[in-house]
């Protein structure tokens, strides 16, 4: 801790170089030439005198392939061959001198052989575990950083490849959705990355991957590369963290479904957290938590565009920003005694955390009917119900029920508490059955059947954009 406090003191009171964490997601890393664009973007910061940490995801689609290999799979050998060919093709597209390409290929083959042995064991034993799954999933990012390193070498930029754990990110041992240990990680990250930055070496860090204190590989959950980037930015007291994606910021609606979506220029951190938890851009639910109370400036954008979404600590117009969708969730509900509300919420939070259910989007309490509602993914619903039953035995809850497999369509913005803002939107979806409505500080969520979710999303988006188009121009 002494090292960390001394480092912060130096950053605050002595002249310093500006520092950036730049994260490149799988949506912008599809082929070898995308890594060249990555380096070009990073060089803009380096040429301007910035210190830069780069976070990279796996090539698009690779994590999905590894998900299949993390459990018994009859065609596992063919899939590893497919992975090998995909990465060899990407590396070749970078256009390295033959000697450097041979060096990188050797490192890639070593990783692929390691993956082969792990997957072979999974299929020999016909079983897997969360620990093994994290280990198998880690190879996507570990292969990706090698290609990124090769691209930096081509341009003569000195860089180094690091896993999240090697960079200093230490987590608990909840494999699959590990939680970073902030105080320990702060010391390790500043010691490790600080040394490289001082030497003008660019650290290329695997997104999504971290590790326990004793070095076992953990992952932060799908979308965890965003969390890796914001976590590093907070721990390093960076000036800016930029998340590069395939669209130029957070949109007013999913462009796959809505017509003419707009880029939202500004969001508050509370609104951004609501977006992440309620399905926007597939951001990790905890993406913005590490930097919520820091001075770090957060940008979401695409390579080669001036458009962007800036996340700030202040509220901005318009009061309603976007609509988003969370598919195939369950809503678990129970009534609570008003006199025991605090005890119930504390016990509920502790129970969820103890059972490893700590990445749920939201817990909501309604004063109107003294009811707590929990948005639960399918894989954790049974655990959530069990926790509420345990609380029922303590006379803290009663009348437990749940709504099965619905889509949650949400309107996000600090103005949701104003009925005048919400009424026109609700009027636009007449004829669509809303199974329940959840109100939060920065969002209102409508649970609808999956077959009406896209229609609901589009109607709400049309009304929202019609009301506030001038604010985005």
Image (cartoon, rainbow, N blue to C red):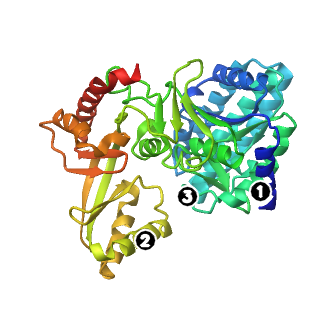
Q: Which residue is mark 1?
A: 5
Question: Which numbered mark, 3 or 1, is in the foreground of this view?
Answer: 1
As measured in the structure, the alpha-carbon distance from the residue carrying label 2 to the one carrying label 3 is 34 Å
Of residues 60 and 200, which is closer to you in this image? 200
Relative to 457, 434 lies left or right: left
User: Where does the image place residue 307, in percent across and percent down from the top left?
Assistant: 52, 21
Q: Quadrant of the C terminus?
A: top left
Quadrant where the N terminus is found in the figure: bottom right
Q: Quadrant of residue 301?
A: top right
Real-space CA distance between mark 1 and mark 2, rounded to the nearest whole angstrom? 32 Å
State the SS at label 3: loop
The mark tally for this picture is 3
Q: Residue furthest front?
A: 13
Question: Which residue is tagged 3?
Answer: 128
Q: Earlier in the sequence, mark 1 or mark 2?
A: 1
Question: Local crowd at mark 3 within 10 Å, few (<14), some, or many (≥20)?
Answer: some
- In-front residue for pair 456/4: 4
Q: For residue 118, say whether it is visible.
A: yes
How many other residues sit within 10 Å of disc 1, few (<14), some (14-19) or many (≥20)? Answer: few
Residue at the left extreme of this rendering: 431
Q: Earlier in the sequence, mark 3 or mark 1?
A: 1
Tell which tag, 1 or 2, sits nearer the viewer.
1
x and y, in percent, of residue 267 in the image: 46, 36
Which residue is at 64% across, 46% downward?
138
Which residue has dot 2 on it?
Answer: 346
Question: Residue 214 lies in what quarter of the image?
Answer: bottom right
| Contact (Cβ within 8 Å) of mark 1 with mark 2 | no
């Amino acid at each position: 801790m002494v090292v960390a406090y001394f480092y912060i003191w130096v950053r605050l009171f002595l002249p310093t170089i500006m520092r950036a964490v730049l994260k490149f997601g799988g949506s912008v890393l599809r082929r070898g030439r995308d890594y060249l664009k990555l380096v070009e973007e990073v060089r803009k910061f380096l040429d301007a005198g910035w210190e830069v940490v780069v976070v990279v995801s796996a090539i698009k689609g690779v994590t999905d392939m590894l998900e299949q290999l993390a459990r018994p799979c009859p065609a596992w050998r063919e899939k590893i061959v497919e992975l090998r060919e995909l990465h060899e093709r990407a590396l070749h597209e970078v256009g390295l001198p033959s000697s450097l390409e041979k060096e990188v290929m050797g490192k890639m083959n070593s990783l692929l052989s390691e993956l082969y042995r792990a997957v072979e064991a999974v299929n020999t034993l016909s079983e897997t575990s969360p620990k093994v799954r994290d280990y198998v999933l880690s190879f996507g990012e570990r292969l990706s950083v090698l290609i990124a390193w090769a691209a930096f070498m081509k341009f003569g930029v000195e860089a180094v490849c690091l896993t999240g754990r090697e960079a200093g990110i230490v987590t608990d041992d909840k494999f699959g959705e590990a939680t970073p240990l902030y105080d320990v990680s702060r010391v390790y990250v500043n010691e490790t990355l600080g040394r490289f930055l001082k030497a003008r070496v660019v650290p290329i860090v695997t997104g999504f991957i971290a590790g326990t204190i004793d070095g076992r590989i953990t992952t932060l959950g799908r979308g965890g590369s965003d969390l890796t980037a914001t976590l590093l930015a907070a721990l390093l007291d960076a000036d800016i963290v930029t998340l590069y994606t395939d669209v130029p910021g957070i949109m007013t609606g999913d462009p796959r479904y809505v017509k003419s979506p707009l880029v939202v220029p500004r969001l508050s951190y509370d609104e951004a957290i609501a977006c992440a938890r309620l399905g926007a851009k597939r951001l990790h639910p905890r993406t913005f938590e590490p930097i919520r109370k820091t001075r770090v400036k957060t940008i979401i954008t695409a390579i080669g565009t001036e458009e962007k979404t800036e996340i700030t600590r202040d509220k901005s117009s318009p009061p309603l920003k976007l609509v988003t969708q969370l598919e195939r969730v369950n809503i678990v509900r129970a009534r609570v005694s008003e006199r025991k509300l605090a005890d119930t919420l504390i016990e509920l939070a502790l129970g969820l955390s103890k059972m490893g259910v700590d990445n749920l989007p939201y817990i909501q309490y309604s004063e109107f009917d003294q009811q707590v509602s929990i948005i639960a993914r399918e894989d954790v619903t049974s655990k959530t119900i069990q926790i509420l039953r345990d609380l029922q035995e303590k006379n803290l809850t009663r009348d437990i029920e749940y709504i099965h497999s619905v889509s949650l369509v949400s309107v996000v913005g600090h103005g949701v508490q104003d009925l005048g803002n919400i009424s026109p939107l609700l009027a636009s979806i007449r004829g669509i059955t809303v199974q329940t409505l959840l109100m939060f500080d920065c969002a209102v969520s409508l649970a609808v059947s999956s077959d009406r979710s896209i229609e609901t999303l589009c109607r709400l988006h049309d009304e929202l954009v019609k009301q506030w188009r001038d604010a985005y121009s």
